[in-house]
Image (cartoon, helix red, strand yellow):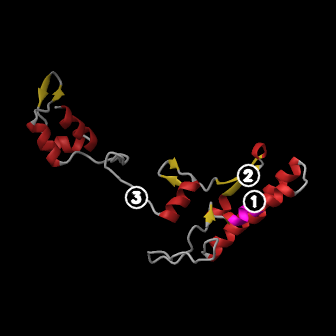
Amino acid sequence: MIAGGELNKKHLTELRKALASMELPPQKRQRLIWRLAKYGVIAAAKRHVRNQESPDGQKWPGRKTKRKGKMLRNLPKLLHIREMPEIQAVRIYLQGGGYRNGEAPVPAGTVGYAQQNGMRVKVSRRSQPRKADAGKMATPAQAKKLRALGYRVRTGKRWKKPTLGDITRTIPYSQAGLLIRKL
């Protein structure tokens, strides 16, 4: 059985017993734990990704798409170690990677989890960013709708109903939509 994806439970208990039996000062014990993580666990993680196999030696299933590239290949570079001397342990975590979803940063652990286990994302139109159609002018359909709703413009001292051509030449697409909603 795999505990946390790196060591099986038997190896972990043997390692803890061996560490407990050693007569080491706390700082040296902590440094030994750090070295085990750095040169044991992280090196093993890199080897598993390189060989595309799990810690118990089973090959990972191949990609379901036509791509032939290896899976999770950049993630072991992002593994970092945090020392936790108060409980005589270390924490191995993913950090960095520069992954983004549009403007928002995405943690490397989330990317690794999604690549390994798959992910379902529900996308709605409301969640999508609005694309400002720069330079796009009102459509003829919008112009007809504005005229039907009674849209008028001021020319000098009097109000005038603009022609379809005037509306499509002078009013931006987004402003026409706003006016239709407001009128």
SS at mark 1?
helix
Q: In the image, which is nearer the foreground, mark 2 or mark 3? A: 2
Up the image or down, 121 lies above or below 175; here it is below
- Neighbour class for label 1 at 10 Å: few (<14), some, many (≥20)? many
- Neighbour class for label 3 at 10 Å: few (<14), some, many (≥20)? few
Question: Which quadrant holds the C terminus?
Answer: top left
Q: Quadrant of residue 119?
A: bottom left
Return the x and y of residue 99 as percentages of the image width and height. 55, 55
Residue ranking furthest to the top: 157
Magenta segment: 10-14
Whether residue 138 is in magenta: the answer is no
Up the image or down, 44 lies above or below 160; here it is below
Q: What residue type is labelled 1?
A: Ala
The residue that mark 1 highlights is 37
The residue sitting at 48% across, 76% down in the picture is 67
Up the image or down, 65 lies above or below 14; here it is below
**Mark nearer the N terminus (2 vs 3):** 2
- Circle 2/circle 3 CB separation < 8 Å: no
Q: Distance between the residues labelled 2 and 1?
A: 8 Å
The residue that mark 3 highlights is 120
Q: In the image, which is nearer the foreground, mark 3 or mark 1? A: 1
SS at mark 3?
loop
The residue that mark 2 highlights is 90
The residue sitting at 79% across, 45% down in the picture is 85
**Mark nearer the N terminus (3 vs 1):** 1
Q: 166 or 174, which is in the foreground?
A: 174
Q: Is the magenta stretch mostly helix, strand or loop?
A: helix
